[in-house]
């Protein structure tokens, strides 16, 4: 089996998450390419060297373009701040690399389109880091839907809530600046959208409300500054299938730490999931004796691919980082020309289209059909 | 203490529920008026007699107006089908009776207004059967909010779901006819609205979507008939306080039996409740050590008034019917001229205003400000 | 249908609970005898009169023997303190009354035997207030077991925990005196035993440990007094069926309010229940696709008899007091000579036999076979 | 920082788990020694070579003694079947290696004692694979106990249940043979015991019951064979602190997949945990307003060390394999002469002492004091 050489840009939360995945993917799955951790880039030289050493990369650099110039590097993980995604991804694709870029694609929609164009022209794999779709229990939802276990889907609700911006006393920082985007909509809602895209297909039309729980936030040096983004977004939508839905995102939701709550209703049952209990799934199937009806709570196990590659015993729990390992495995499959389960730049742009249509509907206070172009 | 004489119209689900409450209120609370169950009315003579006997009423009649003509009857429970509410309530008020009318007020808005007018003119108590607000845990939410336990409320989500119309093979019946109203909106959403009114104040503006999961339903005699009401309603709203919110109602939600799920987010915490576990409440308070933070699950007990009137031990559970007994107790307080916790015809009309604004926003596909007139 | 005349002794927690049940049973069930609330007895004359008025009794007395002398009274509810149960129950039976006596039967085993003897000789109904067995979800467990839904039962665990004695600063009171019994064993464990008796049959042998979390407790006047009862009991047991089991009871379990947690394991599945969520039941059935296996959470509804007599809609919750209404209904069935679901004095003595065998096994530090005599 | 060279014996469930941990520990923690994966041993040459390649080991062998002969190898992971633990661990220690051995120590108690002796004589680190104690939420329990958050512990209940032997139709295999040990007691109960040892100290006395849910099991070739081990164990115990407790283990518990349910009661609160929801912890603290009291559900996050080394955001979930990475980190700390949180061979023998005392108490049907020698 061949060897894949990897370059990584970034050493933050997602940089480390990618590094852990690149280290684990072969030991976990066994049947994929060998991984060579070639070079790690970070603008901070000391950090680059230190993290290259810790993560097992052979070399480090402060110049991310070095990775592109290295002919032996096959794939580049892009985990730098969002504003850098377009340039890095596009240049990497042009340099003949496969690209694994963290979400969201780009703060500006035009940039997302340029990224997609670069991917199309390159013929290389261009994947986005939508890791939640890799959860074996999310795959199980997909399997149940494809088996028609709950009949025809007619209604969907999906919520994503965390509380890292819930404290009104927290200082103003870049996530409250308009330059960072709309707020919860692009920062958060893209994750639920990745689930919708994977499980239910495209959204046809949207009607969004957005809200600022705190009009201003304190500045470090004293005084306050007006907030420019909306930490709360609430969206009505219709899927192309005709099903109606609600999407809610709130990054100022005290008490919620990693909630992505999904409710899918069909003509013969329903499915309930919450990422905070990512190893559980609840399914209700109509029919049978009324006295015995109820939601069945499934615990993740080897019957839910590819859980068994991590642990052979059911009910022992995968974790957040394991999802990235699965995503990495899918990326390697794509690179090997095999079927894969990924949000690539094509689907990524569709998700961005939906996000921007939501923002437009909020401005216009009217329903907007998503234009997929 | 005086005696209150009661007339009851109707012997169905809610008729029995009222009868149970009238039987229980004095034994439970002790300190209220003695109750005399004077007369029960039902169009079916046999049913009227049989139920009068079972429920402990002294007499029965097939003519509900007999209750109004009886000078000794103080209060009339109206539990007949919704279409009869206006005439019965108005006539009863005109006859000098206090009225305890089941929700919703009336299928047509004009009728609700006439009912309110009659109540105003009568000077009598005119209360609606919004029993969920009587849950001691809902009172506990109110107490927490009034104590500012979660700071200023900035976002609310509330869902009401059942599955009695979830089966596409279920026969067409009156709830699918346009004459019954909009569907989930007036049939269901009024309950969540009663909670909002009680806990958070009035709604300022709304934007609703409504959906039919099944375009047609089978007829008993064969063939099908087009459905005229929407079993699903999804609403964005803003409270007069400025807080944003989402209301969802679905009476075709397989697996949900009595779900009324409330999430209230504030600047210092959040509150989560679900009527399917009506004796529990979850509260998150910001502050303290991060390692020890989390939702606290409170179990209903004597500390939550008036639970202790039913059971002196905590964690022993009240049931649905107990809420009606509490409502009855509040009604007696109102009749006695004391403070009470009720949705009266004034507030009831406000709730109807919100419902009709929602329907209008759906027709117009635009935000609508609720006109409270 | 005939009329049953009722006398009630006691006005405390259980006195009120009986009174509520007597008031509700006919309105709820309709098809049983009419109930006449004849006379209420309490040693406190004021309390007797006041409660008789509130509960709807026609008369009151300070002498419980007045109830026995009244030839019109058919049945006597005995809810006085445990020490009075034997005399009251035996005298009532001798007076030709049916008896509905609160649990436990008596602090002393000989008294329980005398009570049983009196019941046998009287030919009248002699029932104990083991209300938890009346929960429709407990009946559902029984149905599942009888249908062999989880195969042959091979292991059982049952816990009963509350925290009313958890505070070490709580004053010494009668429940810490040896004269009150063993402690958690007779105060608490009898409830789980009533479930075992109803669902699984008799216990063959036992091995108990008992513990005092606090060796002494403060006295009101200052100083402390050594505790004489054990707030914690832990028991290994074998059923007559051969299944092994664990019973745990703790009345000093901080955080537990009304927990009765049941786990029943069989060769083809398992059942999990907790009284704190008394309207839910979890059932796992072996077989089927591993990916779809899991516990199904059933919500109480009309499919679970006799829930539908209280509320026709599922998932709307019964409460603690409703269980007493069902118990009362069963009592009326027994009085009418029909099959009923009750712990009568026969079974009650068996439960006492098990309790005393447990205490003996603790003293001997050895397994003890329960002698049912 | 130095480099640690690793040898691994075994390629099964735990072999892979060790391999994943050795690969991840440095990328996750950064501040520990560099890891060189030197050699992997498995009796099957093809498997050895294949897994060495997948796991990233530089070489493979069919002879585990090769690892001991390699002077560059510092530490040996022993994950071969239990019967081989003594010889491998003892020889490795004698060869001057640190040893990381999977639990349980050995089927025979004498062998466990010899292992401890070898560890004492070697002066090297000799650790056992009790991974559940590494859960950040278990550490949080420890922190709460040490801070006296629930007062003095007076009662404990701990259950470990899985269902891999629940099917009576499953073929007879080595776990049903007496040579494998007692059954649930040594196979399972050691995990709960590791938690007790870590959180609450040593056990003083025990009284066990053991049961066979199925007397015989089918043989592959037809016919049946009598089962020789007990899949169910139930134990009463007293801690050296005086607290009473119950330990239950069942490997034939249909529906349970990875349950380790812990309940710890103290004089000022209680703690509840279940490994099936390993990222959650419930804590009840006495005091405060009764209306607001309840269990607080904590979600694992960076405030719970060392969660933050894996994910900087709370509520994102660690998985089972992450616990082994933490264990590996502790092992490296021990090797570096720093404080560590491990079950070493000293504590391991104590746990074995408790297990064998339990078996003895079952044979004698009497309480047995654990002899720690």
Image (cartoon, coloured by chain):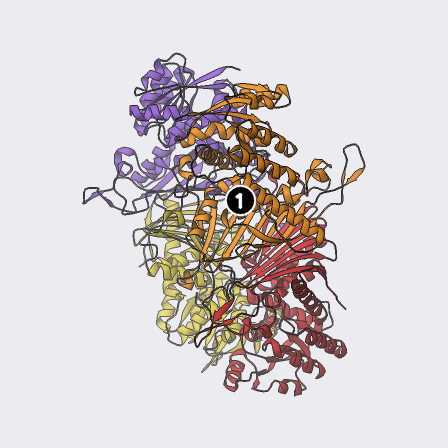
Chain colours: A red, B orange, C purple, D yellow
Q: Residue at x 55, y 80 (%)?
A: A56
Left or right: where D190 falls relative to B94 = left
Secondary structure of the residue carrying numbered label 1: helix
Q: Nearer the viewer, residue A157 or B110?
A: B110
Determine which residue is flagged by label 1.
B275
Query: Which quadrant holds residue A369?
Result: bottom right
Position in image of residue B223 (x %, y %) = 81, 37
Tell me if residue A284 comes above or below residue D335 in the rendering. Answer: above
Q: Is residue D253 visible?
A: no
Q: Is residue C332 visible?
A: yes
Q: Nearer the viewer, residue D77 or D163?
A: D163
Query: Which quadrant holds residue C344?
Result: top left
> Quick one: which residue is furthest to the right in this view?
B223
**Total of numbered circles in the picture?**
1
Left or right: where C308 falls relative to D127 = right
Q: Residue at x 64, y 41 (%)?
A: B109
Position in image of residue C325 (x %, y %) = 48, 28
Quarter occupied by the N terminus of chain B: top left
Left or right: where A351 falls relative to B295 = right
Left or right: where B85 falls relative to B19 = right
Q: Nearer the viewer, residue C215 or A31?
A: C215
> Quick one: which residue is furthest to the top in this view?
C71
Position in image of residue A290 (x %, y %) = 63, 37
Q: Residue at x 34, y 54 (%)?
A: D150
Mark 1: few/some/many CA within 10 Å (<14, 14-19, 20+): many
Q: Chain of mark 1?
A: B
Position in image of residue C247 (x %, y %) = 41, 41
């Amino acid at each position: 089996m061949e060897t894949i050489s990897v370059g990584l840009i970034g050493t933050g939360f997602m940089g480390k998450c990618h590094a852990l995945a690149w280290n684990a993917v072969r030991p976990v799955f066994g049947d994929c390419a060998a991984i060579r951790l070639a070079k790690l880039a970070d603008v901070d030289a000391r950090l680059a060297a230190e993290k290259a050493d810790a993560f097992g990369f052979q070399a480090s650099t402060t110049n991310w373009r070095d990775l592109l110039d290295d002919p032996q590097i096959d794939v580049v993980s892009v985990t730098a701040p969002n504003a850098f995604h377009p340039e890095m991804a596009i240049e990497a694709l042009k340099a003949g690399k496969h690209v694994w870029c963290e979400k969201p694609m780009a703060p500006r929609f035009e940039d997302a389109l340029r990224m997609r164009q670069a991917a199309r022209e390159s013929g290389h794999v261009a994947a986005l880091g939508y890791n939640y779709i890799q959860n074996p229990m999310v795959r199980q939802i997909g399997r149940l839907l494809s088996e028609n276990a709950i009949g025809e889907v007619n209604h969907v609700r999906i919520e994503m809530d965390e509380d890292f911006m819930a404290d009104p006393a927290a200082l103003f920082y870049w996530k409250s600046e308009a330059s960072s985007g709309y707020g919860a909509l692009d920062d958060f809602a893209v994750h639920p959208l990745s689930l919708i895209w994977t499980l239910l297909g495209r959204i046809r039309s949207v009607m969004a409300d957005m809200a600022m729980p705190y009009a201003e936030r304190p500045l470090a040096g004293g005084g306050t500054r007006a907030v420019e983004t909306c930490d709360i977004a609430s969206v009505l939508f219709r899927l192309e299938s005709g099903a109606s839905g609600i999407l809610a995102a709130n990054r100022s939701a005290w008490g919620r730490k990693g909630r992505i709550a999904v409710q899918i209703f069909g003509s013969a049952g329903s499915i309930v999931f919450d990422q905070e209990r990512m190893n559980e799934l609840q399914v209700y199937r109509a029919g049978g004796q009324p006295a015995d009806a109820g939601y069945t709570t499934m615990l993740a196990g080897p019957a839910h691919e590819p859980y068994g590659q991590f642990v052979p015993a059911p009910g022992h729990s995968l974790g957040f980082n394991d999802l990235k390992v699965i995503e990495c495995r899918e990326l390697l499959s794509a690179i090997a020309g095999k079927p894969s389960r990924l949000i690539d730049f094509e689907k990524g742009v569709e998700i961005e289209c939906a996000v921007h249509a939501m923002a437009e509907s909020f401005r216009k206070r009217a329903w907007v059909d998503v234009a997929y172009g």
